[in-house]
Image (cartoon, rainbow, N blue to C red):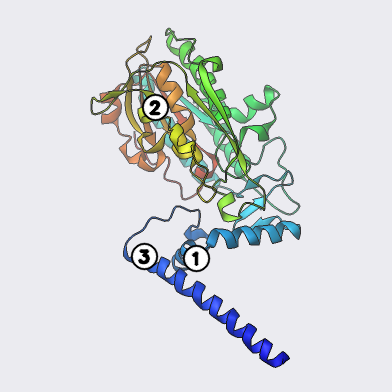
Amino acid sequence: MKKTSAVIFTILFLAIVFGLGILSFAGFVNYRVNDVVINNEWVPELGNKFETDIAATFFQKFAFVSLNGAVRKFLGQQEMNGVVKLNNGYLTETLERCPDDIIGNFVSRTVSFNEYLGKRGTSLLFAVPPYTVSKYDPELPVGVEDFSNDNLDRLLSGMRKSGIETVDFREIINADGIEPYSMVYKTDHHWTTEAAFYAYRFFENYIAEKTGCVIDPRISDIGNYNVTFHEKWQLGSRGQRVGIYFAGMDDFVFISPDFETKIEDSSGKVGNVYDYFFTPEYLENRDISARYAYDYAMGGPAFAGHYKNLNSTNDVKVMMISDSYARAVVPYLLMQFSEVYTILDGYIGDLKPELIEEYDPDIVIMLYYPKYINKNSGSFDFHF
């Protein structure tokens, strides 16, 4: 009787495994043959490309990942799928030390860019946002190393010694007595929308002082915005790799304008900021298997490029060179200033003298997330 039960159990187990394999293989074939886009955080760095593709298309992958995360949390483990849980529960990816010569090259190229801009009367500001691992309270588990803050410190030191104006939001946040972990998401690599609005107000003051322009005080007044709170709404880029139980989920705050705006895109089409930057409808339904609340609610596919504010009280033209951290900053800059041209770091090759001459910016802001300060980064591959 026991032998029969064991055989039946084995057959059922193998049937389940076989069924999962068939379903996963079907998803894999659909992904490979029909070029189906898989929105997830499974990247080749977690294994080879073939293994990554299988992991990305595995049937009920998210459920299995969450189960794995729950078990690891129960066992007190702090690492999973390339993600490290800090002592305070926040998720991060540890960054390697960027070699000094690479840092020096980044500085050298930025210095040349700054000199070019200076000759034409354009100001450059190099800004760095906070990373999940706080410079002042790392919260790293014993034995875990992270060089994100060290890389930023050496880069900023080089920039400052070379006469480039910089702003370090890690320092500003600390000086203002703000809890650093309140400015970043627990499960995502971005800063929060509240932190981005905080940064915008700094940029607004900086630009006003530099240019002497007239600003609209409504834009930096949070009282003129709809601030909606979405509890346990977002499972970010790191959370997607560990599931919903390993560290929980993030709340999401959406800060959208409660006043009229008039925006013109590069094609000459006129609309408002909701047509291009704010997407409240994306927040109507929660999808914990997708990590795009920040990306699509703030900026969406229309994020980069050239936009004009037809209601501007000044004629200041801003250029923002950045990564996705700028998604939650650019909309506010555009509502305050005459024009904003955003170049994503992935399209840094578009940054050429011809573009600068044509656009003629008053202020250029470079804002780079610490992960892009590495030996393989192309974020400084511009030539002036």
The residue located at (70%, 55%) in the rendering is 78
Label 1 sits on what residue type? Phe
**Where does label 3 land, which residue?**
30
Mark linked to residue 59: 1
Bin the neighbour count of mark 3 within 10 Å (Cα to Cα): few under 14, some 14-19, many 20 and up. some
Quadrant assignment for the N terminus:
bottom right
**Where does label 2 land, which residue?**
274
Quadrant assignment for the C terminus:
top left
> Which sits in the foreground, 300 or 105?
300
The residue located at (65%, 41%) in the rendering is 133
How much space separates mark 3 and mark 1, taking CA atoms?
Answer: 12 Å
Image height of 35 relative to 290, above or below: below
Q: Position of residue 336 (x, y in %)?
A: 42, 16
Bin the neighbour count of mark 2 within 10 Å (Cα to Cα): few under 14, some 14-19, many 20 and up. some
Between discs 1 and 2, the one toward the N terminus: 1
Q: How many marks?
A: 3
How much space separates mark 1 and mark 2, taking CA atoms?
Answer: 36 Å
Bin the neighbour count of mark 1 within 10 Å (Cα to Cα): few under 14, some 14-19, many 20 and up. many
Label 3 sits on what residue type? Asn
* Name of the residue lying farthest toward the front: 1
The answer to which image quadrant residue 378 occupies is top left
On screen, residue 343 versus residue 92, left or right, reads: left
> Which sits in the foreground, 96 or 193?
193
On screen, residue 212 versus residue 32, left or right, reads: right
How much space separates mark 2 and mark 3, taking CA atoms?
Answer: 35 Å
Q: Position of residue 241 (x, y in %)?
A: 57, 55
* Name of the residue lying farthest toward the left: 268
